[in-house]
Amino acid sequence: MIQVYREKDYESLSRRAANIISAQVILKPASVLGLATGSTPEGIYRQLVSWYQKNDLSFRQVRTVNLDEYVGMSAQDDNSYRYYMNHHLFSHINIDLQNTRVPNGLATDLQAECTDYDANIRALGGIDLQLLGLGGNGHIGFNEPATAFTKSTHVVDLCESTIEANARFFASAADVPRQALTMGIGSIMKARHVLLVASGDAKANALYRTFCEPVSAQMPGSILQFHPNVTVIADEAALRELDAAGVSIGEG
Ligand code: F6R
């Protein structure tokens, strides 16, 4: 089932998503949260930090697993996703860093790191709530178009379009790593609840193709049409193509 929340702008989208994450943590303090990086979740993390600072939320028992990490990047590199998570969320809340996991892009044996990553998710009892952004090319995590839907955590070669999209964080596109470790579509589909956030015009086409066209490996996120519990939070700009086509996908 897909439930869609239509929000007027990025700020209300961020607040709505933070509300859902905080409800999860309040109802189950030892929740396992699957987390995402990128521009879209920044406002969500800001909101969660602010509620934590007001004593409205505690992360003491929460465990987290992140979607992905660049290969070859250390936690100290400010473009690594471990750095991002510490900077935007973990350093500001009462989470035990031992309970947070981001794939290790410096692992000497990347395959062993992937196997261990999946074993860790299983040992935690699976993911209660998985936060996802959506790539302009339809990727979720770093599962690029034409990836097998069954995959667990694995090493990927990033698409040119993803390298270009992420170049904004680096000095130039040449500096963007060419490989990443990512949870697979199979891992994401096992999460008990998926929360996908999409903001802005640049996501309008991907959002339309993900939820309104037949499921296809060319749009990896489209597999979510088969997930039993998906919440989509999108702003007006991201919903533009759905609106133009007169399609409604479960607005509540
Ligand atoms: C990030 C991730 C990516 C992003 C996607 C959207 O951990 O896995 O799939 O969610 O590229 O990124 P933004 O939010 O920067 O548009």
Image (tube, rainbow, N blue to C red):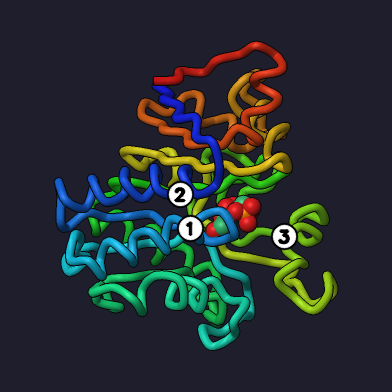
- Amino acid type, residue under disc 2 in the picture: Ser
Q: Residue at x 45, y 49 (%)?
A: 14
- Mark 1 highlights which residue? 43
- Amino acid type, residue under disc 3 in the picture: Asp
Residue 69 visible in rendering: yes
Label disc, if present, on residue 215 of the rendered structure: none
Nearest the eye: 211 or 119: 211
Crowding at dot 3, Cα within 10 Å, few <14 / some 14-19 / many 20+, comes out as some
Label disc, if present, on residue 14 of the rendered structure: 2
Question: What kind of element bears circle 2?
Answer: helix
Instruction: Give the tally of numbered discs.
Output: 3
Please, is residue 232 above or below residue 117 in the view? above
Nearest the eye: 74 or 15: 15
Residue 53 placement (x, y as % from top left): 26, 70
Please, is residue 14 above or below residue 212 in the view? below
- Mark 3 highlights which residue? 157
Question: For the residues carrying marks 2 and 3, which lies nearer the camera in this image?
Answer: 2
Residue 105 placement (x, y as % from top left): 56, 75
CA distance separating discs 1 and 3: 28 Å
- Amino acid type, residue under disc 1 in the picture: Gly
Marks 2/1 in contact by CB < 8 Å: the verdict is yes
Quadrant containing the C terminus is: top left
Residue 39 placement (x, y as % from top left): 59, 59
Nearest the eye: 202 or 83: 202
Please, is residue 131 above or below residue 190 in the view? below
Residue 34 placement (x, y as % from top left): 38, 54
